């Protein structure tokens, strides 16, 4: 896919050379309104956005004044105005009109700022904050532009996408306060991944905003659970201002918790691995199998809490957790990481399900994998069991038809950051040794379910075929169970070693 960002910057520089820093707008000679602190407390930022390169026209005939009023009525106190003309069809005229009409709201100018005189123009146009994209600015220029914002009493909102951007933010933060944003959307390809903000949040040295890709209350809640102080909602708000209220409410009613902790850890590990997939070894029942899988490089270990020949139960989970803690406490290699322990449940209301949830609350398990068929009901039960502190979790969908692919898409749209796909065998929840039909895997991997998710793949995977799956589908996570066994619930050391050898080659 062509680099959309390069095209935007090239065209913008042409317009800057021809029109100057106002880009043809009639900007007042001096600022007419008092500065309103931007994101003074945690909350949502709703966006005035006419179009985008990825979606085309979103709301081309919008009235920025009335739209900002609708946002205020929805509970937002911070408004972002896209002012780029060519690709987003905005302008400084939108910012001037909206900020003049609503002196009590705080306004962010969102654009591809490259020059210091654009900060002064933004200030005079009524901006209380200015977006600075770290990816397109070298460290010295970023610091200079951020200082120009501070000199005028407005907020430098610095956007990051990767670790190199975060390093620039750390340098700029030494000069004075700023606000960071982490964009879930890659500006080069316009694809969205909510685990990018999850991976970076812990390393950002200041308040931070989750940007892009939020279109459901579940996604808004997830951003707050990750520990973000704000959420920027663009397309979803501009298309349907009345629906914005539910997004604002979902973000503001949530708080940082163990759901966010789990996904920050998953995101961090994924980023560190580079091109190698995350590996989950499921069906663990014995500490010796858990230790070998951990030594070989497993990122997650699954323990089954359901009627199954691989059922683990509470005692086995505690034994595994204790053995892993001891192994990694004694390890001389500080870079080695204990695998995350995941309890696999089919019915969270069952005895086994309640036991797994209790172990998660006690810190024995790091997360719950829901492998049942009623996520609308059961994911809420898991969340309710979190008692305000949260339980890390993700859902699995068994694929046997296009209708199952649609279920994956529904979960992604509802805000689930990842969904594991497994083979559908009627009457058996998992560990069947059966592979998913490749045509269905291809539909999920190609993004038919949602452009926001990567492939988490289970179903009949073992040493003989794992390399082929990696090369064909590039999964982000591989989950194997029965293909690594000497017998139900007992791993075969030789198969485990060969499995990881195939993954790492």
Image (cartoon, grey):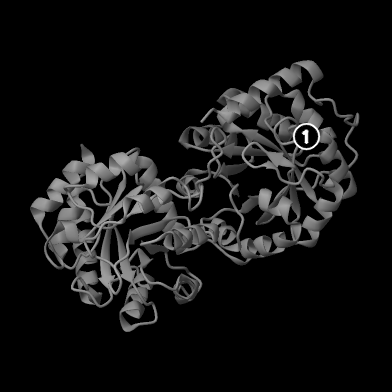
Q: Is residue 346 left or right of residue 37?
A: left
Q: Is residue 21 left or right of residue 205?
A: right
Q: Nearer the viewer, residue 320 or 326?
A: 320
Residue 215 visible in the shown view: yes
Q: Is residue 71 above or below residue 33?
A: below
**Which residue occupies 56% across, 43% down?**
182
Q: Is residue 491 above or below residue 122?
A: below
Secondary structure found at label 1: loop
Give how far across and how far down residue 300 sits, in percent.
Answer: 29, 56
Q: Is residue 198 above or below residue 369?
A: above
**Which residue occupies 81% across, 57% down?**
70
Q: Nearer the viewer, residue 313 or 237?
A: 237
Residue designated by label 1:
152
Q: Is residue 85 left or right of residue 211?
A: right
Q: Is residue 483 above or below residue 120?
A: below
Give how far across and how far down residue 255 sits, in percent.
Answer: 56, 63
Give how far across and how far down residue 102 sits, in percent.
Answer: 86, 50
Q: Give the quadrant of residue 53.
A: top right
Residue 335 visible in the shown view: no
């Amino acid at each position: 896919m062509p680099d959309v960002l390069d095209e935007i910057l090239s065209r913008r520089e042409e317009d800057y050379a021809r029109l100057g820093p106002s880009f043809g707008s009639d900007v007042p000679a001096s600022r007419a309104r008092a500065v309103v602190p931007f994101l003074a407390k945690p909350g949502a930022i709703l966006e005035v956005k006419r179009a985008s390169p990825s979606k085309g026209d979103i709301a081309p005939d919008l009235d920025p004044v009335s739209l900002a009023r609708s946002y205020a009525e929805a509970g937002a106190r911070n408004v972002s105005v896209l002012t780029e003309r060519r690709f987003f069809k905005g302008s400084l005229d939108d910012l001037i009109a909206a900020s003049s009409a609503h002196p009590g709201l705080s306004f962010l100018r969102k654009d591809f700022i490259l020059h210091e005189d654009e900060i002064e123009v933004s200030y005079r146009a009524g901006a209380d904050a200015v977006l600075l994209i770290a990816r397109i600015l070298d460290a010295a220029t970023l610091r200079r532009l951020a200082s120009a914002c501070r000199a005028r009493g407005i907020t430098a909102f610095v956007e990051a996408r990767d670790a190199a951007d975060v390093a620039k933010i750390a340098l700029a933060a030494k000069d004075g306060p700023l606000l960071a944003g982490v964009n879930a959307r890659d500006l080069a390809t316009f694809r969205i991944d909510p685990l990018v903000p999850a991976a970076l949040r812990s390393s950002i040295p200041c308040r931070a905003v989750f940007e892009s890709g939020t279109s459901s209350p579940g996604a808004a809640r997830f951003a707050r659970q990750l520990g973000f102080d704000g959420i920027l909602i663009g397309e979803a708000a501009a298309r349907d201002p009345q629906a914005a209220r539910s997004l604002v409410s979902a973000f503001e009613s949530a708080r940082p918790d163990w759901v966010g902790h789990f996904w920050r850890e998953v995101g961090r590990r994924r980023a560190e691995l580079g091109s190698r997939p995350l590996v989950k070894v499921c069906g663990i029942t014995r500490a010796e199998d858990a230790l070998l899988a951990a030594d070989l490089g497993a990122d997650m270990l699954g323990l089954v809490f359901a009627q199954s020949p691989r059922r683990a139960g509470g005692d086995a989970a505690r034994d595994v957790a204790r053995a892993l803690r001891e192994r990694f406490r004694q390890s001389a290699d500080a870079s080695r990481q204990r695998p995350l322990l995941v309890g696999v449940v089919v019915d969270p209301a069952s005895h086994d399900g309640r036991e797994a949830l209790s172990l998660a609350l006690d810190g024995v398990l790091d997360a719950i994998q829901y492998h049942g068929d009623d996520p609308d009901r059961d994911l809420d039960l898991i969340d309710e069991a979190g008692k305000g502190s949260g339980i890390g979790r993700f859902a699995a969908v068994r694929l046997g038809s296009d209708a199952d692919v649609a279920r994956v898409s529904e979960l992604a749209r509802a805000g689930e950051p990842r969904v594991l796909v497994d083979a559908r065998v009627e009457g058996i929840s998992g560990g069947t040794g059966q592979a998913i039909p490749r045509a269905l895997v291809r539909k999920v991997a190609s993004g038919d379910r949602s452009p926001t998710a990567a492939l988490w793949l289970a179903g009949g995977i073992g040493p003989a075929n794992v390399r082929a799956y990696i090369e064909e589908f590039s999964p982000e996570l591989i989950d194997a169970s029965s293909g690594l066994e000497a017998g139900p619930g007992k791993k075969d050391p030789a198969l485990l070693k060969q499995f990881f050898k195939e993954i790492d080659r």
